Amino acid sequence: TWKIVGATPVLDPIWPEVTQDGKFAWVTEGDGQKVKKIDLETMQTVAEVSTGPGPWGARLSCDESKLYVADKGESAGYAQQGRTMTVIDTKFNIVTNVVPIGRTTDHVILSPDCKYVLANSNADHGIWIIDAETEKVVDVVKMPNDGDPHGGTFVRWRSDGNGGVVGEVLSTLTGFRGSAREAQIELIQRMQQAVVVQVNPRNSFAGTPTSFTPETVSVAPGAEVTFLFVYASGTSGPILSIAGPEDSFGTFDLKPGQRKLITFTAPSTSTTFQVTVPGDEAAKTLTVVVEEPEPAEGGMEGTALFHEVDLVADGLKWDIDTLTLKAGEMVRFTIANRDDEVHNFINVETGFVAPASPDVSGGQTSSFEWTVPNQKGTFKFFCSYHPSMIVDVTIE
């Protein structure tokens, strides 16, 4: 109809980066030194994250777990001389890294194989190539005659089978195209359907060892299973090595804020194996039980994937005093913060600490998921900024 269907206030909006499902848009604020995460159904801002000076272009990672923001220096006083790329975790809405790049970078582009992020610097006349996994600059390609590499396009050429050549655009400054986009959508769907395992690094202050949440996962014999390992820490935690059976699971490293998809086929017979943290003798293990699933009671179908829990913070108080959860169930918390203060919802004993619960700014609403550990008892969950805000959570 070419009519406006919604609007929300944004200071100096420059670049909208929309998720593949069309539910959210990340919008850079050139003169605001931040990006806003906007719910496109309600047209409400659900998160604000600070960036470097004058952000311009932005690009969601292949799995949409990260947002790469080009801090061009578009805001007053910086003369377009910004020289950093801010990396944002889109689940917890926090900055996880700042990568030095060339000056006056308008756009970042992803390689179709998801291995590299390319930042195009106008003032320094080159392309900064960043390894997407390590977030380290691995090379700089200088432009001939000091050219300004504003945009960029990945194209794949192949034979048409009749002596001719066919070209397919795979990636541009506005995202993936063609078969690359189809692969991206498939990757996102795999992540959404995966068994989420939170890796909690040891916390010497709280006296907690490295652990997994949940501690036990059951899978069916012969099933192809995808695990999504999420490192539940900020940027200061150690790199953790995770290991399972080499013939099916393998060994991989996780760094703070990183996620890793592992897909394997479970043994055809009932068994049990451990996923460990080599080199950390005090670490707890993840137990994977391969067994036939028990039939659902009463033949119930269509059970909700998440147990939805709504929390309202108002007057430095939660709207509930108690909450009962079941061990092993997946919970989606939604915090509506009606105060002017920042709130979160944590418990050290169960490993449910920031950024497992992100900070929710005053007047904002944010949702996040948690798999309840097999740790039965009653625990006091509270806001780390306001410890008097307590909810007694019983895990059965």
Image (cartoon, grey):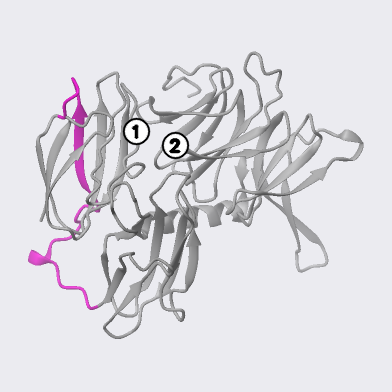
- Does residue 274 lie above or below 54 as drawn? below
- Asked where in the image residue 275 lies, by quadrant, the reply is bottom left
- Residue at 73% x, 35% y: name it: 102
Q: Which residue is mark 2?
A: 94
Decide if residue 95 is on the left or right side of residue 86: left
Type of the residue with mark 2: Ile
Up the image or down, 162 lies above or below 21; here it is: below
Q: Position of residue 376 (x, y in %)?
A: 13, 57
Q: Say which of 171 and 282 sits in front.
A: 282
| First to last magenta residue range | 291-318
Label for residue 359? 1
| In the foreground, 84 or 385 | 385
Image quadrant holding the C terminus, namely bottom left
Q: Main secondary structure of the magenta part?
A: loop
Most foreground residue, 108 or 278: 278
- In the drawing, what numbered circle is on residue 41? none
The picture places residue 337, in percent across and down from the top left corner, at 26, 26
Q: Is residue 120 magenta?
A: no
Query: Does the residue at mark 1 contact the one at mark 2 (Cβ under 8 Å)?
Result: yes
Rendered location of residue 286, percent (x, y): 31, 67
